[in-house]
Image (cartoon, rainbow, N blue to C red):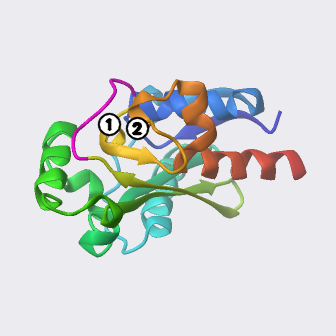
Amino acid sequence: MRFSTLLVATHNAGKLREIREVLGGWVGELRAQTQVPDAPPPADETADTYQGNALLKAEALHAATGLPTMADDSGLEVAALGGRPGLHSSRYGTSDGDRIRRLLEELAGVPEPDRGARFVCVVALALPGGARHFFEGVCPGSILTAPRGAGGFGFDPVFLVEGLDRSMAELPIGRKNQLSHRARALAALRDWMARD
């Protein structure tokens, strides 16, 4: 086991479930920011890269606790929209439904071959003593014309995973945790734990 305790700078229960699924065997106790007494508020995502935003969040919680802390930043990059919403995916609307509606409206009339997209995730790990590590994962696919599936969160219902005939929201959690951008970044973190 690499960490007896690992903090996760997130308030997203779905994200925490995904992290626990991938890292459970490597961490004694995995705690979200909401489970940390006197935790600071979530850090503002003011950086201009996924790596920068993930590090801001990880360092803020790590500074308050001194414990190993991870955070991630991710986004959906749509080719037909010049890579948008990208870094601003979470601020693309006030709810998952709003974000999906806006995305589908912006892609109205765009033919299927031109609806390519990818999810990108960068995990930052802040450790006592000042060490910082980064792990990246990418999941290619395309954007559907309507939502499909009841699982997942965010843009999952409209993201068709490359090589499959299922949206991310139609995948069982175990399968999603093999294919998603976050799962791939977490797998890179897990592999680092196994080596180090």
Label disc, if present, on residue 11 of the rendered structure:
none
Could one spot residue 38 in this view of the protein? no
Label 2 amino acid?
Ser
Could one spot residue 173 in this view of the protein? yes
Give the vertical position of 177 relative to 88 (above or below).
above
**What SS does tag 2 mark?**
loop
Label disc, if present, on residue 167 of the rendered structure:
2
For disc 1, the marked residue is 157
Closer to us: 157 or 23: 157
Which picture quadrant has residue 2? top right
Residue at (46%, 35%) from the top-left corner? 15
Rounded to the nearest angstrom, the CA distance separating label 1 from label 2 is 6 Å
Residue at (46%, 43%) from the top-left corner? 9
Q: Residues within 10 Å of mark 2 (few under 14, many from 20)?
A: many
Q: Range of the magenta residues?
A: 145-151
Label 1 amino acid?
Pro
Give the vertical position of 174 relative to 76 (above or below).
above
Residue at (34%, 70%) from the top-left corner? 79
Residue 192 is situated, as x and y percent measured from the top left of the image, at 79, 53
Residue 44 is situated, as x and y percent measured from the top left of the image, at 30, 58
Q: Are marks 1 and 2 in contact (CB under 8 Å)?
A: yes
Query: If you read the primary sequence from the N terminus, does the residue marked by circle 1 or circle 2 appear first?
Result: 1
**What SS does tag 1 mark?**
helix
Asked if residue 52 lies left or right of residue 127, the reply is left
Of the 4 image quadrants, the one containing the N terminus is top right
Closer to us: 50 or 76: 76
Helix, strand or loop for the magenta stretch, by majority: loop
Closer to us: 40 or 20: 20
Give the vertical position of 78 relative to 163 (above or below).
below
